[in-house]
């Protein structure tokens, strides 16, 4: 089995694949797709093993923190101008 990256759409009764998708096909199918320019071969990349590091848990000596409460923003009050004070 080989992995190939398609350059065109490939559709059939078993699957439909978009351009740019990487699929795994038989050696014969990969050879045919590459030879006709429909795909390019993709090398198998070995995934690096990830090492999980444990972070030290800090010891808390203080009291538990209470969640912050959200308050509504202050409302601005504007002085209304009476009709007598308006400039005409």
Image (spheres, rainbow, N blue to C red):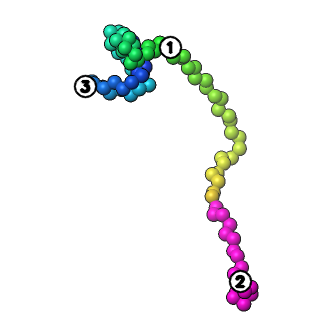
Q: Which residues are magenta?
A: 71-88
Q: Which residue is mark 3?
A: 13
Q: Position of residue 73 (x, y in %)?
A: 66, 63
Task: Work out how far the residue at label 2 is from the one at label 3, CA to CA, in angstroms.
Answer: 77 Å
x 34%, y 24%: residue: 10
Of mark 1 and mark 2, the one earlier in the sequence is 1
> Circles 1 and 3: CB distance less than 8 Å?
no
Q: In the figure, is residue 20 to the left or right of 52?
A: left
Quarter of the figure with residue 24: top left
Give the residue number, with chain letter if any, for mark 2.
81
Do the residues bearing badges 1 and 2 touch, measured as CB atoms within 8 Å? Answer: no
Please tell me in which quadrant of the rendered image residue 12 appears: top left
Q: Quadrant of residue 61?
A: top right
Q: Is residue 87 left or right of residue 66?
A: right
> Pointer 1: what residue?
46
* Residue found farthest to the left: 13
At horizontal 37% and vertical 14% (from top left) the residue drawn is 36
Q: Residue at x 63, y 58 (%)?
A: 70
Check disc 2 and report its element: helix, strand or loop: loop
Secondary structure type for disc 3: loop
Instruction: Give me the C-alpha separation between circle 1 and circle 2.
Output: 75 Å
Helix, strand or loop at label 1? It is loop
Residue 79 lies in the magenta stretch: yes
**Residue 5 vs residue 67, the one in the foreground:** 5
- For the C terminus, the image quarter is bottom right
Location of residue 35 in the rendering, given as x and y in whole percent from the top left corner: 38, 11
Q: Nearer the viewer, residue 87 or 64?
A: 87
Image side of residue 68 versus residue 17, left or right:
right
**Residue 37 placement (x, y as % from top left):** 40, 16
1 or 2: mark nearer the eye: 2
Q: CA distance from mark 1 to mark 3?
A: 31 Å
The dominant secondary structure in magenta is loop
């Amino acid at each position: 089995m080989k992995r190939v990256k398609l350059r065109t759409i490939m559709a059939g009764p078993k699957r439909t694949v978009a351009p740019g998708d990487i699929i795994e096909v038989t050696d014969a199918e990969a050879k045919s797709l590459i030879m006709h320019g429909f795909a390019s071969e993709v090398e198998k990349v070995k995934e690096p093993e990830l090492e999980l590091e444990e972070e030290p848990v800090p010891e808390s000596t203080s009291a538990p923190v209470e969640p912050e409460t959200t308050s509504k923003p202050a409302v601005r009050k504007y002085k209304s101008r009476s009709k007598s004070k308006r400039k005409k």
